[in-house]
Amino acid sequence: MTESIPPPPNYPPSNSPRQAPEATVVLRTEVMPEPARWAWSWLQIGRNTKCLLVSVVTAPMWAAALLDVRTEQHQSGAWFMAGAAVCVALWLDNRRKGFLTRVLVWTTALGAFGALPVFSALVTLLTGSRS
C-alpha cells in the first residue's frame, strides 16, 4: 500500500538568489482648509429675512389676539399664551426645519413683542422693581 503513493516532485534547484518583495507606500496628505474663525452660516440670513418679511404680515394678527387676552383676562395669561406659543413654534422648527415653521417662530416672537410690554417685563425681571 505504501507503494501507491508517488514520490515527491524533483524540482530543479534555482540558481538565482531570493529577492525580497518590493513594497511601495504612497502617502497622500491633503491639507484640509481651516474653517473660518467666524462662521456666520448658522444665522441663515437669507432664510430668516424671507421668513421675517412674511411674518410682518401675520404677526399683527397674533399680537391682536394676545392683546385681547391681556385686556379681557389678565397680563399673566397673555404672557403664558405667548410663551407657550413661542416654545411650541421653536420645538416645531427644531423638528421640521421648514419655511412655515420658521415663519411661525417669527410670528409668535414679533406678536409677543407687539402686544406685551417685553422691555418693562425684562427690567422688572432683572431688577425686581416695578416702578
Image (cartoon, rainbow, N blue to C red):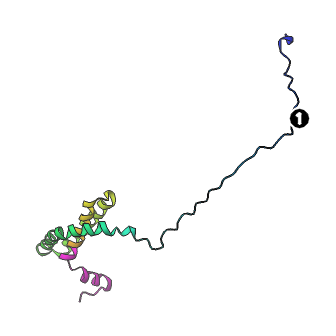
Q: In this view, which residue lies farthest toward the top?
A: 1
Expressed as whole percent of the image width and height from the top left, the position of residue 129 reads 27, 87
Residue 52 belongs to the span the image colors magenta: no
Expressed as whole percent of the image width and height from the top left, the position of residue 96 reads 31, 57
Q: In front here: 97 or 124?
A: 97
Numbered range of the magenta stretch? 112-131
Expressed as whole percent of the image width and height from the top left, the position of residue 77 reads 19, 71
Q: Amino acid at mark 1?
A: Asn
Question: Residue 131 sits in which quadrant?
Answer: bottom left
For mark 1, give the secondary structure: loop
Question: Residue 63 sits in which quadrant?
Answer: bottom left
**For the N terminus, which image quadrant?**
top right
Q: Which residue is mark 1?
A: 15
Question: Could you classify mark 1 by the number of other residues whose Cα lies within 10 Å: few (under 14), some (14-19), or many (20 or more)?
Answer: few
On the rendered structure, is 31 left or right of 110?
right
Q: In front here: 95 or 42?
A: 42
Q: Is residue 84 at all visible to an observer of this figure?
A: no
